[in-house]
Amino acid sequence: MGGGGGPTARRGAPVRGGGGAARPASLVLALVVLLQACGGAAPDGGQAAAGSPGAGERGELLVSAAASLTDVMAELEERFEAANPQVDVVLNLGGSSALRDQVLAGAPVDVLATANPATMDEVVAAGLVDGEPTVFATNRLAIAVPSGNPAGVEGLASLADPSLLVGLCAVGVPCGDLAREALDAAGVTAAVDTEEPDVRALLTKVAAGELDAGVVYATDVAAVAGAVGALPVPGSPVTAYPVAVVVDAPNRVAARSWVAFLTGDEAVAVLVDAGFGRP
């Protein structure tokens, strides 16, 4: 999981910190330049000469996925590669808004999976998605607290207490927007001390005891069971996860196979086991 800087200040202006898991676009670009130099990507999006990397379901597949998918994506990667041994899946994990910006900036991504439709819609509107995005999972919110809940957080209302250290994901990040929606619905104005670039950076600070509470996804809490405690968010809004092939995907053939796999029965079963809802 990505970490987030040093200890959080108890009060003052919101801190935007936390190291996300996303690889910078420059690194992704460098990887693909190397592949092209070695013949691993073809100009026509994966239709290289027979026998070369990138011909059919071969070569490197760059998958940018929301940070809340970190743990389950590792298992899905393993299963896909077992069925497609000529494909090397490279996961680029981070906040959905950061991943969107990488694609909009021209990073050579094959597949994009975001934690809400609104972020994906911006990529669609820019004409950078091949076909229609498909929803493959859903998620709900939970309040993460350090193990044992030492601050005695009781629910959303507790997040208005200025004596507590409270974290949310940043505005524009799906978990942050969803948390603010839930807070508004509950009539709570949270005393926010830090805004993190993705949900895993926020969860890391809670687990380390740097925060008394943070609003994350229920699946993130389940993924680190024992490291943090969780409180439910009654009436939590639900977010949907869409996936799509990027229009200029360097490995379009494998990208389409990945999307078909991710929306198929095997992958959905893995996602449900990890706590995600069915699409």
Image (cartoon, rainbow, N blue to C red):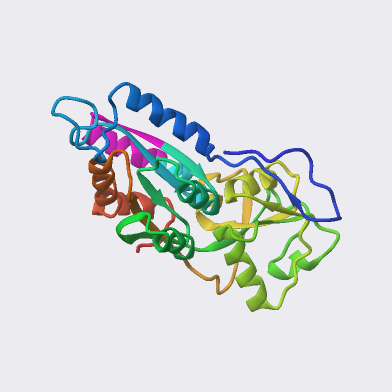
Does residue 162 appear left or right of residue 20 in this picture?
Answer: right
Q: Residue furthest left?
A: 50
Residue 113 visible to an observer of this rendering: yes
The residue lying at 64 percent from left, 68 percent from top is: 180
Can you tell which quarter of the image residue 34 is in? top left
Q: Position of residue 249 (x, y in %)?
A: 32, 43
Near-viewer residue (239 or 122): 122
As for residue 49 lying within the magenta part, the answer is no
The residue lying at 52 percent from left, 34 percent from top is: 26
Does residue 219 appear left or right of residue 44 in this picture?
Answer: right
Q: Residue furthest front?
A: 43
Residue 232 visible to an observer of this rendering: no
Near-viewer residue (55 or 88): 55
As for residue 76 lying within the magenta part, the answer is yes
Q: Which residues are magenta?
A: 74-90
Q: Position of residue 242 (x, y in %)?
A: 39, 59
148 lies above or below 138: above
Which image quarter holds the C terminus?
bottom left
Q: Position of residue 115 (x, y in %)?
A: 47, 57
